[in-house]
Image (cartoon, rainbow, N blue to C red):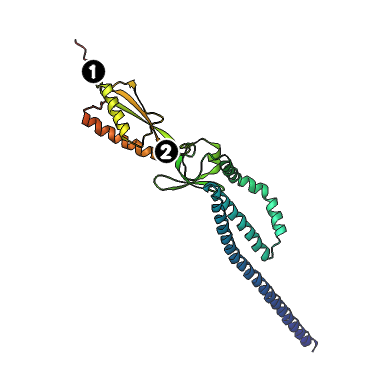
Amino acid sequence: MLSTLHIMLLDASSKINVEAILDKLVNWGIEAGKDIIGAILIFIIGRFVIKQINRLVSKILQKRKLEVSVETFLKSLLSILLNLILAFAIISRLGIETTSFAALLASAGVAVGMALSGNLSNFAGGLIILVFKPFKVGDYIDTETADVSGTVKEIQIFHTVLATLDNKIIYVPNGVLSSNAITNYSKQNMRRAEWVIGVEYGEDVDKVKKVLEELIEADTRILKDPAPLIALKALSASSVDIVVRAWAKSEDYWNVYFDMNKNIYDTFNKKGIGFPFPQLTVHQAKD
């Protein structure tokens, strides 16, 4: 009789324990569900708010007529900061203590700093580029260290975006650009083009110079000030080398350069001015 009563009490207590555990699990699931749904809502609303803030800031920056390079840098920085705030809000809604999370980040700061030392230098490089302005959006630059060249499309927090002549997009670290030599082909509004033309020995140099002067005069893109220069540069092994130096606007440089090459070739052929070929004179000794 006692054993039967004991078994019944055990069964009753086990049922109570199971019900209590299930009740706790249900309550925890409800609370966790609320937190997860709340975090999802915060994410959706936060992304919408961030997008609207970015649009508003973009309009404000455009109205202030800032340089495009400064504008893209500020928008990139703002986007990262807003997303970090959103991440902390989501973490807090999920019940994770932000203070302990911040302490964890602080304790790992040294290791993260060492791991991201390159990115930190790139960030500092981006600030240097914005302050000292060795180039801006729209400039065509060449970097010998990175061995890339192209038109600057964006200056972001860590990288500068270049578009090459064959329409490839290259992301160059700002640290590399700020600490190494850069050739900016768009910084000045004028560029000097140079041609070295070799003619045969025996050609009338004055006639050649006159033809070249006529070609320069006919091209309205070539500037009169500074004045073009035509001079006999060198007496080479197989040719008389004449140098032509003329100035043009930076945006006209390549068109002027290539067009003049073609005009020189066509006109010299019409005028009977010969282009030399490499020559080698062999003397045979008599026995």
Q: Residue furthest top?
A: 287
Q: Residue furthest right?
A: 2
Is label 2 or label 1 in front? 2
Disc 2 to disc 1, C-alpha distance: 47 Å
Q: Nearer the viewer, residue 257 or 206?
A: 206
- Left or right? Give the position of 242 relative to 137: left
- Quadrant that contains the C terminus: top left
Q: Are marks 2 and 1 in contact (CB under 8 Å)?
A: no
Residue 192: x, y in percent? 40, 32
Res. 262 visible in picture: yes
Residue 83: x, y in percent? 60, 58
Residue appearing at x 57%, y 58% in the figure: 56
Sequence-first tag of 2 and 1:
2
Name the amino acid, label 1. Val
236 relative to 265, above or below: above
Q: Nearer the viewer, residue 182 or 66?
A: 66
Label 2 Cα crowd, 10 Å radius (few <14 / some 14-19 / many 20+):
some
Name the amino acid, label 2. Ser
228 relative to 46, above or below: above
Residue appearing at x 75%, y 81% in the figure: 13
Looking at the rendered structure, the number of numbered marks drawn on it comes to: 2
Per the rendering, the mark at residue 250 is: 2
The answer to which quarter of the image holds residue 96 is bottom right
* Circle 1 SS class: loop
- Quadrant that contains the N terminus: bottom right
* Circle 2 SS class: helix
Residue that numbered label 1 is attached to: 282
Per the rendering, the mark at residue 236 is: none
Residue 224: x, y in percent? 38, 31
Q: Nearer the viewer, residue 11 or 267?
A: 267
- Left or right? Give the position of 177 relative to 168: right
- Left or right? Give the position of 269 relative to 131: left
